[in-house]
Image: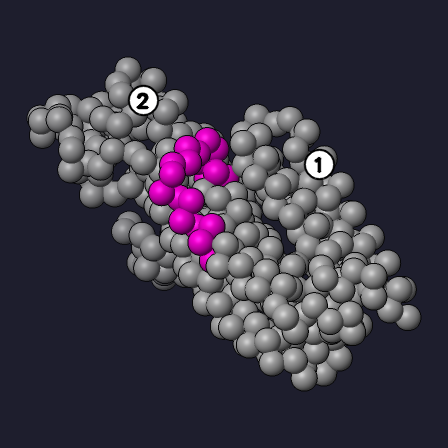
Amino acid sequence: MLHYFSSIIIFNGILFISFGVILLFNKNKFGIEANKVLSLLFVLIGICYIIFAFGQLELFTRLYLLDHVLLFLGLPIFYFYIRTYFRNRYKFDKLQLLHLTPFIIQFFIWLYLLFSPEAQSAEFHFDANNFNFTIFKNQHKINILVLSLFYFYLIRKDIITYQELVKQEYSYSDENTLIWFYIFLGLIISTPLLISFVNFSSNQVHSIYPAAIMTINTFAIVLLILCRPEIYKSIGAISPIQLSRRSNKNCSLSHEKKEKIFNALLELMENKKLYLNPKINLKDLSKTLETNPNYLSQSINTISGKSFFDFINSCRIDHAKELLVNNAYSNYTIEAISKESGFNSKSTFYAAFNKLCNMYPSEFIKRFRQLPDPR
């Protein structure tokens, strides 16, 4: 029975390694650098699975617990994948080698267990009756939990920074993409935790539960990536941006120049209605105005007090309000109105309308119809 479950786990490990190799050689426009890190993570996960499986067998008992040590290496790799994903290109410095500290500490603890006098016995097994094993599993549970929460905080912080800077460069977003991305984060971070806790909490070292969790996790991650290619292709709302954009506080433009650029923008919006293009972005708009993207961003932020995203959406909402009260569009659905106004999704339209008008489109229509006829 043990060999049967070990075979299942080894198969999952090979699947992860194979998928990592495929990602490594997958060529696309944006995600090449990020995919190198993601492929390394998948290969590491696959190796952990295989080591775990062989560690259950009598011939390879010395490998037992090594997979738990490698978990501390997987978390920083996953963190650097996120950083590379949002930046597209990411430079590492020597200071970031500190992320390897928890892994190095755990590795030496494992070596101590492996070469301790007690472990030299041929009949030695890591089990609940072994004092060193008990110490190892208790400190492992605490440290892996604390480290996972720490990296979740860092990753969440990066995502929030990304979302803020996207609004300075893009007029559209796809929250559905980020929802799927959060699910991907959850699968990667929570599953090793769950496996570790289940394995260490079981009275028996050999358990069916880790095999079941690993199998479900493997197919869930593979299916998610196949169904949501933006995770590795950087499509949709996930666009390559510079997370180190200069702050508006360092702006060298005078207030008069900002007003000039902003007024030219207003004139362009009124005459050509470029906001109706659902894919309009700061870079393209700055080319049309023959100015620097950073200058345009600073002008919008300073004069209107809004981000590029909110400014464009305010123009779209004004246009949508005109359509909602226009009898020529009375047979249009709200979703059709949102598309006519330049929004790429109904949910984004509803959120923007409620933010700017403190009501939803249906309520706006209802209130307009209740107004007395000015004639």
Image height check: is 285 above or below 92? Answer: above
Query: In this picture, is 7 found above or below 173?
Result: below
Q: Quadrant of residue 63?
A: bottom right
Residue at image point 61% right, 27% down: 28
Instruction: Provide the residue span drawn in magenta.
Output: 84-102
**Which label was assigned to residue 21?**
1
Tell us which disc is closer to us: 1 or 2.
1
Q: Position of residue 156 (x, y in %)?
A: 43, 55
Mark 1 or mark 2, earlier in chain: 1
| Numbered label tally | 2
Instruction: Name above or below for residue 180 compared with residue 145.
Output: above
What residue is shown at x 36% (from left), y 47% (from top)?
161
Disc ID at residue 226: none
Q: Is residue 282 left or right of residue 192?
A: left
Asked if the residue under mark 2 is in contact with the one under mark 1, i.e. CB atoms within 8 Å, the reply is: no
Element class at badge 1: helix
Type of amino acid at the residue the image marks with label 1:
Val
Is-magenta flag for residue 96? yes
**Label 1 vs label 2: CA separation?**
40 Å
Write down the quadrant of residue 56 in the picture.
Answer: bottom right
Pointer 2: residues within 10 angstroms few (<14), some, or many (20+)?
Answer: some
Instruction: Give the label on residue 286, or none.
Output: 2
Q: Provide residue 354's location: percent of width, then percent of height.
A: 37, 56
SS for callout 2? helix
